[in-house]
Image (cartoon, rainbow, N blue to C red):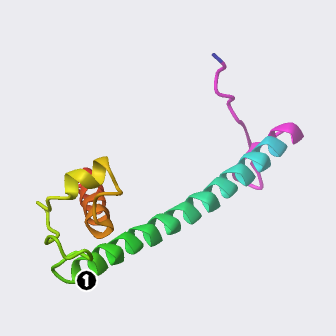
Amino acid sequence: MATTPQPRRIRLAGREAVALTPEEYEQLVASRRQIGGQSARVRVLAHQAKRTEQLLCELETLIDAQGDVCRDRTHVPSVTCPDTEAARKDADTACLRCAVAALLRRHRDATS
C-alpha cells in the first residue's frame, strides 16, 4: 500500500506555501479536471432525476384524475383493482390504466 505523499512546505514572503514538482502539479491539474467533469455529470443526472420524478407525479395525478371507470368500463380502478394482479402477469388481459397505476404504486411504495 502506497503512503500518502507529504507536501514540501516552504515560506515565501513570510507566507507558508507548498512546493510541487512539475509532475505533481500536472497530476493535480488532471485530478481537478476529472472532478470537474464528474461534478458536471452528477448535476445532469440530478436534474434528470428531478424531471423524472416530476413526470411520474404528473402521470400518477393524470391517471387518478381520469375518472372512476377503466376504459373498458368493466371495473373501477383502485388499490384493490381486480385486474392489478393480472396486469403484472398478463398485460394483454388487464386495462393499461390499472397496470400503470399499479406499477406507479409499487415503485412509490418501494422508495418510501
Is residue 94 among what the camera can see? yes
Question: In terms of secondary structure, where does tag 1 sit?
Answer: loop
Determine the residue positioned at 30% across, 47% down: 89
Is residue 104 found left or right of 39 in the rendered image?
left
Determine the residue positioned at 67% across, 57% down: 36
Between 92 and 15, the one lying in front of the other is 92
Q: Which residues are magenta?
A: 2-24
Q: Is residue 67 above or below residue 84?
A: below
Quarter of the picture containing the C terminus is bottom left
Q: Specify the quadrant of the image occupied by residue 73.
A: bottom left
Is residue 19 found left or right of 47 in the rendered image?
right
Q: Residue 17's x, y, as percent?
A: 72, 48
Instruction: Examine the structure image and report whether residue 22 is included in the region drawn in magenta.
Output: yes
Q: Looking at numbered disc 1 in the image, what kind of residue is underneath it?
A: Gln
Q: Is residue 104 above or below residue 16?
A: below
Quarter of the picture containing the N terminus is top right
Between 25 and 86, the one lying in front of the other is 86
Q: Residue 24's x, y, as percent?
A: 81, 38
Taking the view exactly as shown, the residue that stands out farthest to the top is 1
Q: Specify the quadrant of the image occupied by residue 98.
A: bottom left
Counting every numbered tag in the picture gives 1
Between 8 and 112, the one lying in front of the other is 112
Determine the residue positioned at 52% across, 66% down: 48
Is residue 77 found left or right of 104 in the rendered image?
left
Q: Residue 99's x, y, as percent?
A: 29, 61
Residue where numbered disc 1 is placed: 66
